[in-house]
Amino acid sequence: MKKVFSVLGLLAVLLLLPTCKKQNPEQEKVDVQFEVPATMTIEDGASEISFRVQFAKPPVSGDQIVLGSGTAEYVCPVTSVSDTRFSASISGVWSKGFGPGTYTVSHQRGATKTRKGTMEVLIKGAGDIEPAAGVTVYGMVTCDGTGLANVVVSDGVEVVKTDSKGVYQMKSKKFNGYVFVSTPSGYEPFVSGLLPVFHTKLKANAATAERVDFQLKKVEGQENHRMLMLGDIHLAARNDDRKQFAEFVKDLNATVSATPGKVYALTLGDMTWDLYWLDNKYSFKEYLSDAAGIKGVMLYHTIGNHDHSMYYMGDFDTVKDYKENIGPTYYSFNIGKVHYVVLDDVECTNSTKNSDRTDGAYVRAYDGRVVADELAWLRKDLASVPNGTPLVVTMHIPLYNNKGQYGLKEASTLANVLKPYPEVHLYTAHTHTVYNKDELATDHLFEHNAGAICATWWWTGKLTPGVHIGQDGSPGGYTILDIAGTDFKWQYKATGKGTDYQFLTYDRNQIHLTKDKYAPNYTGSDFKPSIWGTASSANEVYVNVWNWDPSWKVEVTEDGKPLTVSQLVSGELDPLHYIAYTAKRYASNSAVTFPTGKNYHMFKVTASSANSTLDIKVTDRFGNVYTETMTRPKAFTTDQYKF
């Protein structure tokens, strides 16, 4: 019987073999080989591109070359073929948004598509330009083949404008290795994936003149636009962060799709985490891959301290990886009537090798400062901006701390550079909290420390699913900035919640945080939850209004009777964050790296009894009203606050 089964089994295998060979017969016939150049320069409006055939294996008539950029694909039919070269038509791609950028190059025959490589596409504008004496970078800024006048172009040191024909010429020392255009109002750059293509890396040495052209597209409706400010993403392939980030992407996509007009997005730094670039093999490329799920919006970037490399000394070299994968560390652009400026206010001072690591890393050290060379560039950039123009400025480390005091080195110097402009909105991150500093009346500046997408470095979402909050109790999320002409309005948007979610309430009678209850196995002595560590029957209710500023109102009534509301000006801990993160880390005797911190947007009222119902009304500076009818006693558990 064993031999019979063996023979039958062999026959079954032999019968299956021809079927396996025929599963994808088309794949066997596709053997096309050609060289994909690292860079291809294409004349603006050209009808064809060509490639060099390798190993005498050209494509055939009916094949296609597919150029991919993020979610966009441009199909280019093969038009002429020889044993050494072939061409593909690009006549149909210009009207579909094709422009400069990095593209994957694939060969397609029928349903079989094979990736062949990646190349950077540069678009050369029409017309010859003779560089003037001493000019090392020159070119044209065009839209649909026509030169654009008075467009600002910079290398991060020099700032020049295009002439009446759209031509610029710059005596650049090529210190930063790139040149960028400050996109004028009414235009947009093309995109590569999510990234706006407003800069080009320089390739020649500092003494050699090279041409760099920029292509922009004309757009309408910019005067009324929305900018989404995205602070502290901190992806590092840990704490289930990529899964949690995917939920944020769904939320952001819903916001984008619900926005009727023009919408853009701008990160506020720390998209990655330098410590895990090698440890977890997660850096900018992986971040951009995860961020590719964001739809319908181009994504500008601000650099953060954790986007600087640990593997170099000083400040300049620590941004090599960022510039290679993201772009310039400071730059500007215009949307509608607003001039946007993105700054790098992280000055790395790495100088000592990290003895705890064997990979050559330095002990990461930095100061919060806009360095002198960058300030010099900023002055030149703003010299082209009329004084009546409102500014939106982003940088990672705040100008002011949450106590309202300067926190940046040489902060007053930066504030004075910006002061001539009538309204400057400064958006920062870094603290993983939300607070505001209104200095419009004196310095014409309003700083928004705009929260963190990752909240507490994704920890609370991992330890306490459904309670994704920062160290001040603010939910993980982002700020929505709406601009109508020169009129600014903003709201904080918690991931997974509507914009009507603007505060948390706590029934003090129900809160008693003890080590025995929340961290019984903790062996240390740092379990110190402030006032929440003692029981209370004082009938107090606390309201944490994270995006509060002095123009907001917090009102509470009990049976129609107004109660006196007082702000805790000395600051207080948020009890929900304490039990969602801090206490849980203590409970496992783990390091509490990001402990609950004092916030200064907590308010208190005293009710007449432990069982009364309170009506809480919070009104923001724009008249938006947020309410809660708080039935007491209100339980204090993490389940009570999940969303």
Image (spheres, rainbow, N blue to C red):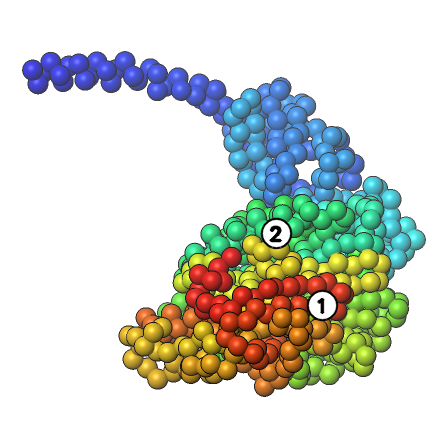
- Placement of 75 over or under 72, stated as above or below: above
Residue at 81% across / 79% down in the picture? 441
Disc number lying in front (2 or 1): 1
| Furthest-left residue in this view | 1
> Residue shown at 50%/23% (left/top)?
30
In primary-sequence order, the first of circles 2 and 1 is 2
Lateral position of residue 65 relative to residue 376, left or right: left
* Residue 247 image offset from top left, x and y in percent: 52, 51
Find numbered disc 2 in the image and state the secondary structure of the residue it sits on: helix
In the image, farthest residue toward the front: 559
Q: Amino acid at mark 1?
A: Asp
Which residue carries the number 2 mark?
Answer: 252
Q: Is residue 319 left or right of residue 414?
A: left
Q: Position of residue 194 (x, y in %)?
A: 64, 49
Q: Amino acid at mark 2?
A: Leu
Question: What residue did someone put label 1 on?
Answer: 620
Badge 1, how many Cα within 10 Å: few under 14, some, many 20+? Answer: some
Q: Residues within 10 Å of mark 2 (few under 14, many from 20)?
A: many
Q: Quadrant of residue 590?
A: bottom left
Quarter of the image holding residue 278? bottom left
Work out whether residue 141 or residue 586 is closer to the camera in this orientation and state it. Answer: 586
Residue at the far right in the pictured view: 164
Q: Is residue 548 visible?
A: no
Front-most of residues 382 and 121: 382
What secondary structure is found at the residue carrying circle 1? Answer: loop
In the image, 343 versus 407, the foreground residue is: 407
Q: Residue at x 35, y 84 (%)?
A: 525
Residue 131 position within the rendered picture, expressed as x and y whole percent measured from the top left? 83, 56
Residue 12 horizontal side relative to residue 422, left or right:
left
